Amino acid sequence: GAVVSQHPSRVICKSGTSVKIECRSLDFQATTMFWYRQFPKQSLMLMATSNEGSKATYEQGVEKDKFLINHASLTLSTLTVTSAHPEDSSFYICSAAPGGRYNEQFFGPGTRLTVL
Amino acid sequence: ELKVEQNPLFLSMQEGKNYTIYCNYSTTSDRLYWYRQDPGKSLESLFVLLSNGAVKQEGRLMASLDTKARLSTLHITAAVHDLSATYFCAVDISGSNYKLTFGKGTLLTVNP
């Protein structure tokens, strides 16, 4: 159980285009989803936290107009990187938490974004 | 602000040897997690430590938690090449919507 999927797993796009990444909890309902970014040889950095039906909470330094997050249902959250630039190239990982006492996060397989 | 420090950041060891990775954190926390990450992959959950004195073991890995010292250890026994990966500890705080703060990671290389 507790499987989280991400789509696509890898995407290459031109500078200036927008890219949408989907995160789905396959066998549980996620009250909270988290989006992380990981640059090569670095740790995971939390970008934003989203709760179903409400606006995402962004971490300091993350541009909310550039990284649009929509948590449309209890099993789906999307991250849209708008007007992507080469510096946005990174590994994006989502996680989903079912709520309850322990609310452990379950991580998706990640999406490798390359902006040319 | 919660800070999580791991050491060492790089660890090269021979097969068959033992070693310990340390994870210190700065604020009282509810839970501590250990993850493994292989190159190009996402995180694999290894251990969830929920209380002071908690000890969990899986194969050649054993994790422990001392909440009073704000310290967790990941002990590797008789390392094998397959354990080569990056290991992260992460801590969350109740009341923060269970946001995780990660350590910088320990890149473990086990040499034959």
Image: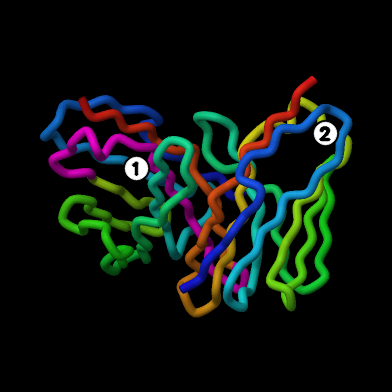
Residue neighbourhood size for the residue with mark 1, other residues' Cα within 10 Å, grouped as few (<14), some (14–19), many (≥20): some
Instruction: Report the side of A27 relative to A72 (left or right).
Output: right
Q: Nearer the viewer, mark 1 or mark 2?
A: 2
In the displayed structure, B17 sits above or below A104; it is above
Using the image, determine if residue A115 lies above or below residue B4: above
| Residue B35 image position (x, y, % from top left) | 63, 48
Q: Which residue is mark 2?
A: B79
> Percent position (x, y) of residue B28?
61, 78
Instruction: Kindly identify which residue carries mark 1.
Output: A22
Q: Is the residue B74 above or below the residue B85 in the image?
A: below
Is A42 magenta? The answer is no
Chain letter of the residue carrying label 2: B
Q: Position of residue B50 (x, y in %)?
A: 72, 69
Mark pair 1, 2: CA separation = 37 Å
Q: Amino acid at mark 1?
A: Glu
Q: Going 31% across and 48% down the picture, which residue do you hit? A: A78
Look at 45% across and 65% down and name the residue there.
Answer: A31
Same chain for mark 1 and mark 2? The answer is: no
